[in-house]
Amino acid sequence: MMINASLLEKITLNFAGDVPFDHLDAKERYIYSVMNNIERILNTRRGSVKHIPDYGLPDLSIIYRHLPSSLSLLQKFITMTVLKYEPRVQALQIQLIENKSSDFIIAYELLCQLKEVGYIRFSTTFNGDEAVKVFR
């Protein structure tokens, strides 16, 4: 049974980026829902959700200050957190993408094995304002 979208997405009838819920088939809704949830997880700082203290990533300013040695640590945090808090992701491989842009500091490619769908690639970018974008 494929879960199409989260409760928030069903209420707003949109995915992040104003992608209309009803313009997508069930498989695409599932993928967008997972992508949106991963972005939400990566944009949340650990400790900011009081009842789930390990939800999200650590303070990115610390990661940025210790680049490039902190890249593998960030990769580890992404893997642990996504696998724990996005139950539709069964397996995750992360690879650093060479940064050829001044629009962001770090970029990763996430190869996610999704329940019911198979493998999907998402790209992530981390900009200097600590905002994380996830896209296909």
Image (cartoon, rainbow, N blue to C red):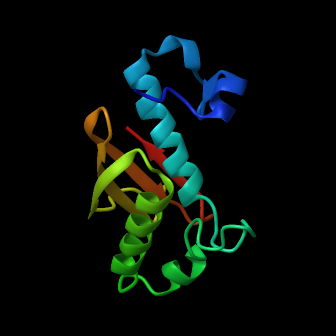
- Residue at the farthest front position: 1
User: Can residue 18 be seen from the camera position used here?
Assistant: no
Looking at the image, residue 106 lies above or below residue 7: below
Q: Nearer the viewer, residue 115 or 94?
A: 115
Quadrant of the frame with the C terminus: top left
Q: Splitting the image into 4 quarters, where does residue 46 fall?
A: bottom right
Seen at 37% across and 74% down, the residue is 76
Q: With 128 as the anchor, is 105 left or right in this view? A: left
Does residue 72 appear in the picture of this structure? yes
Place of residue 67 in the rendered image (x, y in percent of width and height, measured from the top left): 42, 82
Residue 20 left/right relative to 125: right
Residue 109 lies in what quarter of the image? bottom left
Residue 100 image-quadrant placement:
bottom left
Q: Position of residue 119 (x, y in %)?
A: 24, 41
The relative height of residue 55 versus residue 125 in the rendered view (above or below) is below
Q: Nearer the viewer, residue 107 or 39?
A: 39
In-front residue for pair 12/87: 87
**52 in relation to 9, above or below:** below
Q: Quadrant of the N terminus?
A: top left
What x and y, as percent, mark residue 58? 57, 76
| Number of numbered discs | 0
Where residue 108 appears, as percent x and y from the top left, is: 34, 59
Side of 105 where 56 appears, left or right? right
Left or right of 51 in this view: 70: left
Residue ID at (58%, 65%) = 56
